[in-house]
Structures are given as C-alpha cells and as structure tokens.
C-alpha cells in the first residue's frame, strides 16, 4: 500500500505520460474525471449537502489526513471559502525527492477542483501557486456576490512567497500563456546566438538575440538579450544583475530565465530586486529535450542554453 504522500511521484509521472502521449485535453479529462469526480467524490457530496461549509469540513479533514500545513477560512456572509497553504506535502514530496517529470505538477489541483466545484454550482474565483509548495485560493457559490478576505495569515504576506515562479488562475482559467509562448512572443522572428562564456563579444546581427549566463551578462553591454541565471545561483551575481536592470528602461531589460530545479527552486529573487525569472523546464519538457533525472549530473549552463535554443527551434 502507498503512503499518504508516496502517490505524488506516481502522479507526477502519470501527468507527464498522459500529456505527452495523449495531449493536454486528455490530461484535463483525467484530472476532472479520475480525480475530481471519482477519488474526490466526497467533496461533491459534502458540497451538495452543506455548501461551502460542507467543503470547509471536508478540506479540514483532508489536511489532518495528509498532514497539510495550511489554514482554511470560511466566511459565509462574504460567500468565500479560502485556503492558505504554507507547505504542501504533495509538492513538498517532489521537492524533497528531487522529482520533476511533468511540466507543471501544481496545475492538477485547480484541474480537479474546477471540475468538482462546477458540479455543485461553485467556482474557484482566484488562485496562485509558487511551485515551492505554497499556494492560496478563494472559492464561492457561483453567480452570487463575494468579498475577498484580508487575513493576517495570507500566504502572500509570508517572506517565502517571494520565492519560485507564480502561476495565477482567475475564475478557474490560467491568467498567462505557457512559458514557451511567452518566450516565442518575446523573441519574435529573431535568431538565438549563444554567447561564448570565455569571449562574450556582442551579437553580430541586428536581428539576433544573445542568450547568455547571468555572469556573462554582467560583463557585456548587450541590450537585447536573454539571460539564463545559473543553478545554483550566486547571490552576488543576482544582486549585480538587479543593479544593472535598475538602470535600464523596461524595453531594454533582458528576458530572465531560470531552471527552478527542485533543490534550488526556493530562491527569493524578489528580495534581491529582481523580477521572477521565467521557468525553462516547462519549455524543455514540452519540447522533449529534457527529462529530469534526479540521479544524473546536472547540465552545464552552456548545455542548458543549447537545449533552450533546440526547444525553440532557433
């Protein structure tokens, strides 16, 4: 028999397998049917029986069973049921065991919750997760006014919220496109030129985009470039990049990228004055050029850059 968190590694592998071989729609159907209306049927039953309070009681019991470090808050007068997750045992299992097979493991929660709530006339109004085991969400009875809650223990007030990369859902739909699409849009029709660490030089064509490490970026004057932050990151380098960005207009700032590997996911970029870098693993996994092996030697920064260029066919 699997332990209460041991199934998480199987979840991670299964989600990737289904997404890769059967597509995004099939994966969403798996979340909705196999999880949302099968293994989590008790949420639907209790929601039908007692509305938001029935869900509140059920999730609190789940927290006890799965040893979640979270707080659920119910305010029926405001038509809101909210959770603030300080440390998710499910995502925490993957981080602890250096597992990262699927491109976005955390998405499965909203995937099954969205389906379950929909069957009982409710919806997830707002949700965010930072891929470090922290998240929050607010649910309501659909079609009725609601008031968002201002809580002292709002997870967004926790200093650790400044780590990781944020994914946001508004009215149950992801607010931003996939990282691959973000990078493609940023690149336009430009060619990627991987900059030599030993001899940075400059991009030789106007239409090129230089892809370089953060340490190399500090030694160049390139204005149109993408910067891959090394893993593990060096604090002095990060602060140097932040200082350099501070003096640049938004249009001339580089596109920041980072692997967010399990062992180095919880870097507080925001605390150092940096925007959260875009994650590269979802890009590489979706393109089939990366399969994270917890026992393998990590790629060099140059190899990461080559994989990025290959994944984007540039």
Image: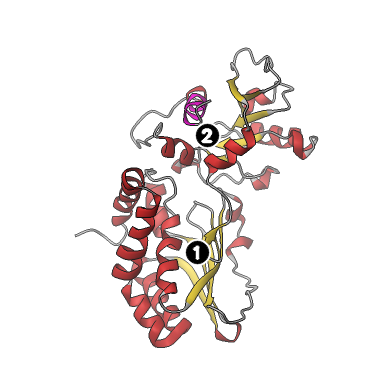
Magenta segment boundaries in residue numbering:
304-311
Answer whether residue 216 is magenta in the image.
no
Q: Depth check: 150 or 272 in front?
A: 150
Occupied quadrant, residue 218: top right
- Mark 1 Cα within 10 Å, few/some/many (few <14, many 20+)? many
Total marks in image: 2
Residue 235: tell me if it is visible.
no
Residue 141 in the image: above or below residue 256: below
Separation of residues labelled 2 and 1 (CA atoms): 26 Å
Residue 221: tell me if it is visible.
yes
Q: Secondary structure at mark 1?
A: strand
- Residue 30: x, y in percent? 33, 58
Q: Secondary structure at mark 2?
A: loop
Residue 217 in the image: above or below residue 156: above
Would you say 13 lies left or right of 208 here?
left
- Residue 298: x, y in percent? 42, 29
- Identify the residue position indicated by label 1 in the image: 85
Whether residues under marks 2 and 1 lie with C-beta atoms below 8 angstroms apart, the answer is: no
- Residue 155: x, y in percent? 58, 63
- Residue 6: x, y in percent? 29, 55
- Earlier in the chain: of badge 2 and badge 1, it is 1
Q: Depth check: 200 or 84 in front?
A: 200
Q: Depth check: 146 or 261 in front?
A: 146
- Identify the residue position indicated by label 2 in the image: 232
Answer whether residue 305 is magenta in the image.
yes
């Amino acid at each position: 028999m699997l332990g209460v968190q041991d199934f998480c590694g199987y979840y991670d592998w299964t989600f990737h397998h289904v997404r890769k071989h059967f597509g995004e729609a099939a994966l969403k159907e798996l979340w909705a049917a196999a999880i949302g209306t099968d293994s989590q049927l008790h949420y639907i039953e209790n929601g039908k029986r007692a509305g938001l309070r029935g869900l509140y009681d059920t999730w609190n019991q789940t927290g006890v069973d799965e040893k979640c470090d979270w707080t659920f808050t119910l305010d029926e007068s405001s038509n809101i049921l909210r959770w603030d997750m300080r440390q998710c045992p499910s995502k925490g299992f993957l981080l602890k065991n250096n597992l990262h097979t699927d491109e976005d493991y955390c998405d499965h929660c909203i995937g099954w919750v969205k389906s379950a709530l929909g069957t009982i006339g409710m919806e997830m109004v707002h949700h965010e997760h930072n891929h470090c085991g922290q998240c929050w969400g607010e649910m309501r009875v659909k079609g009725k006014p609601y008031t968002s809650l201002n809580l002292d223990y709002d997870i967004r007030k926790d200093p650790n919220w400044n780590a990781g990369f944020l994914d946001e859902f508004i009215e149950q739909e992801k607010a931003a496109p996939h990282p691959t699409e973000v990078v493609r849009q940023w690149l336009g029709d430009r060619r990627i030129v991987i900059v030599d660490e030993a001899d940075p030089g400059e991009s030789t064509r106007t239409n090129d985009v230089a892809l370089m490490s953060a340490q190399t970026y500090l030694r160049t004057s390139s204005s149109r470039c993408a910067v891959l932050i090394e893993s593990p990151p060096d604090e002095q380098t990060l602060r140097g990049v932040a200082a350099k960005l501070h003096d640049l207009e938004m249009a001339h700032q580089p596109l920041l990228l980072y692997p967010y590997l399990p062992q180095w996911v919880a870097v507080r970029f925001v605390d150092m004055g940096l925007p959260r870098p875009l994650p590269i693993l979802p890009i590489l996994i979706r393109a089939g050029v990366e399969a994270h092996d917890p026992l393998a030697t990590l790629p060099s920064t140059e190899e990461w850059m080559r994989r990025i260029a290959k994944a984007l066919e540039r």
